[in-house]
């Protein structure tokens, strides 16, 4: 009988909820680190489940205020963190969350005798070190490696939740894609990725690259979204140079938005196919989004 306790940071997010559920179903006690406990009670925007029933304890903290994370790790055996900045937040940088927020958690974990720290970075990060949202993950990875804490770093390719964003564009009637849409990638469902994350607790690998079971081009994933909605595909391929101009202009007025755009443009600029796992299919995810009328 499993009796270990894990702190899940980022428990209210897309991946975090599936990880909370997976840990709980394998018998772990789960402490969820969240900014807003109410989020745990309802379903997320990409069908990620409500997870309040799987959580043993809630710890409320905000990475922007690093003092608020003190003692988050007290009494836990393991830390899992997918706490990260994925959407623009006014005045908040990925350095504050991905790097310094996770570093504050690591310091707390070291002070409290935690036995392992599992962290989510980004697949192909070395190709995108010019992107803040990627570099800050890897800056934390360097801290983690230097700390002496046993660790596993997992670097996933795209999530189904990103495909939810394409689905929303398709629902609105039109999709804009950077580039010619021919680059390939293998997105993964949160539940499939959560299994890899929990297996990493006792697994020997310190670094894991991982993606989903099916490989698509960007154009294919978007055509599938239109098909799930019963609509004729309507896709505009925006040349990369226009993306760069849009990025420059956005950067003048809205730095947080420009940072997210730079990630989207960079990651779609090359093939991003990671070693495959999982059994959940994108077509089913789209079908479910379509039937719910949500996302
Ligand atoms: N999406 C992808 O394709 C992809 C691919 C590879 C790696 N990743 C990485 O995987 C991680 C998880 O991604 P996701 O899609 O699950 O993201 P998500 O749904 O946006 O979840 C991010 C989590 O971090 C929390 N968080 C953000 N700012 C915080 C703060 N100031 N203090 C405390 N918690 C904070 C969020 O809390 P709230 O709910 O309160 O906002 C949420 O629980 C991220 O680090 C992301 O960069 C994503």
Image (cartoon, rainbow, N blue to C red):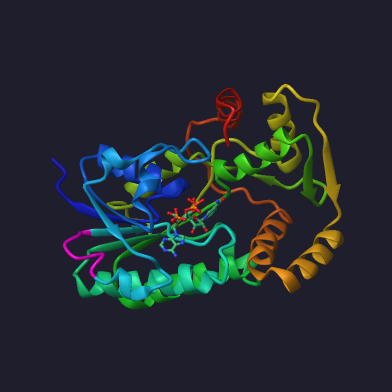
Tell me if 278 is positioned left or right of 40 in this view.
Answer: right
Q: Residue at x 26, y 45 (%)?
A: 55
Q: Residue at x 53, y 39 (%)?
A: 46
- Residue 186 drawn at (x, y percent): 60, 43
- Residue 85 drawn at (x, y percent): 52, 62
Tell me if 235 is positioned left or right of 150 in this view.
Answer: right
Q: Is residue 120 above or below residue 213?
A: below
Could you tell me what secondary structure mostly forms the magenta stretch?
loop
Q: Quadrant of the N terminus?
A: top left
Magenta segment: 71-77
Tell me if 233 is positioned left or right of 112 in this view.
Answer: right
Which of 233 and 257 lies nearest the eye of the viewer? 257
- Residue 272 drawn at (x, y percent): 64, 51
Quadrant hosting residue 191: top left
Tell me if 213 is positioned left or right of 215 in this view.
Answer: left
Which of 264 and 249 lies nearest the eye of the viewer? 249
Quadrant hosting residue 43: top left
Q: Quadrant of the C terminus?
A: top right
Q: Residue at x 77, y 34 (%)?
A: 173
Q: How many numbered marks appear?
A: 0
Q: Is residue 277 above or below residue 83?
A: above
On whether residue 127 falls in the magenta region, the answer is: no
Which of 37 and 234 lies nearest the eye of the viewer? 37
- Residue 57 drawn at (x, y percent): 22, 51
Quadrant hosting residue 134: bottom right
Q: Residue at x 79, y 38 (%)?
A: 174
């Amino acid at each position: 009988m499993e009796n270990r306790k894990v702190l899940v940071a980022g428990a209210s997010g897309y991946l975090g909820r599936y990880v909370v559920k997976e840990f709980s179903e394998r018998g772990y006690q789960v402490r969820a680190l969240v900014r807003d406990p109410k989020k745990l009670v309802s379903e997320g925007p990409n069908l990620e489940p409500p997870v309040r029933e799987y959580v043993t304890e809630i710890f409320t903290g905000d990475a922007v205020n690093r003092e608020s994370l003190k003692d988050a790790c007290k009494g836990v055996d393991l830390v899992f963190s997918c706490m990260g900045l994925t959407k623009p937040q006014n005045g908040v940088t990925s350095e504050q969350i991905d790097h310094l927020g996770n570093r504050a958690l690591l310091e707390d974990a070291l002070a409290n005798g935690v036995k392992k720290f599992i962290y989510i970075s980004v697949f192909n990060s070395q190709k995108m070190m010019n992107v803040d949202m990627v570099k800050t993950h890897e800056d934390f990875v360097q801290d983690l490696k230097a700390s002496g804490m046993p660790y596993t770093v997992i670097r996933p390719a795209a999530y189904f939740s990103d495909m939810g964003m394409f689905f929303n564009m398709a629902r609105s009637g039109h999709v804009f894609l950077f580039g010619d849409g021919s680059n390939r990638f293998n997105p993964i469902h949160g539940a499939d990725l959560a299994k890899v994350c929990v297996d990493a607790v006792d697994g020997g690998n310190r670094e894991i690259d991982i993606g989903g079971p099916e490989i698509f081009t960007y154009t294919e994933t978007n055509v599938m979204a239109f098909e799930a909605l019963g609509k004729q595909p309507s896709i505009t391929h925006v040349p990369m140079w226009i993306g760069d101009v849009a990025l420059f202009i956005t950067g003048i007025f809205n730095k947080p938005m420009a940072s997210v755009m730079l990630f989207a443009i960079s990651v779609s600029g090359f093939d991003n196919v990671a070693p495959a796992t999982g059994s959940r299919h994108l077509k089913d995810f789209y079908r479910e989004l379509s039937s719910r009328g949500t996302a």
